Image: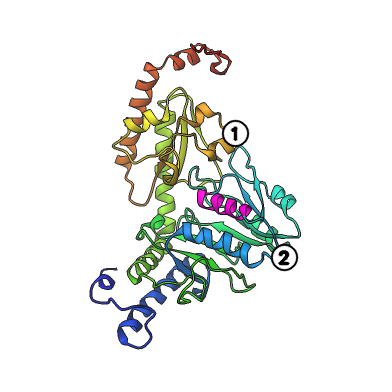
Amino acid sequence: MLPHLTAQYGNPHSRTHAYGWESEAAVEVARAQVAALIGADAKEIVFTSGATEANNMAVKGVAAFYASKKRHVVTTQTEHKCVLDSCRQLEARGVDVTYLPVAKDGLVSVDAVADALRPDTALVSVMAVNNEIGVVQPLAELGALCRARSVFFHTDGAQALGKIPLDVGALNIDLMSLSAHKIYGPKGVGALYVRRRPRVRLEPLIHGGGQERGLRSGTLPPALAVGFGAACAVAARDMGADEAWIGRLAARLLDGLTSQIEQVFINGSTSDRYAGNLNVSFAGIEGESLLMALKDVAVSSGSACTSASLEPSYVLRALGVDEELAHTSIRFGLGRFTTEAEVDYAVELAVKHVKRLRDMSPLWEMMQEGVDIKSIQWSQEH
């Protein structure tokens, strides 16, 4: 990236001089590297500012282009907020949106998706790997269903890219949103995969100079694009090693927590999930209190996009998790550079503070005595 922030500072869209040609060549190499990681053609990659923009482009763009004939979109209740908010924007414009529930394991039923499809359904949007609970949706089955029913299939692949094998052709994915910083690339750049055959058409959100095949106007940042491409190349090379390492760390983390703390609950499927995302609930404590106690460890109680909210996670509520238990959830993230010593330290702190908070909690003491907390009628003074 550094050369493109200093010496090689040409505009990649300037076709009349060597500085532009040099930057354009670098961007096209990066485009090919991103495409290779998902089994796409380089011409199908549209660079964006990130997955949020890509999700907006896909959901709003397809709905707008086919609005004269198709006025229905299907998604799930556990999608990223930018997909859900895009769908609400569509509803304000008169588009029907079906928000499908998920099972207790966080997975959507393929049969439920099939039942929700209508002759005027333009798009199905289902996240590949959930950002809060790490569950992996049945992409192959959903893709096959949508292709058979002539409905475009979009998936938010931000949390899946470089972490699980992805082949847009084999999975029948028509649009996929991607983000660089989820795979150790720079923040501020992402991409939208847009299938060319069978062709997917969408109205652009940003109008102007017609860059990116007219789908996303504006000057591209070569340094960010190059960083994204390099991150994809590394991910393609190291995905197998990363998977083995992160799987080992996840087992170490979960065993360390469950062997020393009682009533620890995994949120989401225990089998169909990405190992690097472990979302657990600790009965009898307040999650925000535990978060504050674990200030030396980078954990969260939900997605970074909603971490300022004190409301229980809408994803966990969609799974049917009780509000009290949802408030106790903590998301642990593991990655390529996480060490065993860091996992052990996180376990040590979690065990220490969960026990401390439970010792201070009269509710935990009542739970230990078999009292059903939900049955208590709490008196209120007026």
Q: Position of residue 36 (x, y in %)?
A: 47, 69
Name the disc covering residue 69, or none: 2
- Which residue ends up furthest to the front in the rendered image? 382
What is the image's colouring? rainbow
Residue pictured at 63% horizontal, 62% vertical: 63
Residue type, label 2: Lys
Q: Which residues are magenta?
A: 80-92
Q: Classify 10 Å Cα crowding around label 1: few (below 14), some (14-19), many (20 and above).
A: some
Q: Quadrant of residue 17?
A: bottom left
Name the disc covering residue 320, or none: 1
The correct choice, above or below, for 349 with respect to 303 in the image is: above
Q: Is residue 98 visible?
A: yes
Q: Nearer the viewer, residue 286 or 279?
A: 286
Q: Is residue 172 visible?
A: no
Among the two numbered marks 2 and 1 on one chain, the one whose residue lies closer to the N terminus? 2
Residue 116 lies in the magenta stretch? no
Most common SS among magenta residues? helix
Side of 1 relative to 304 (left or right): left
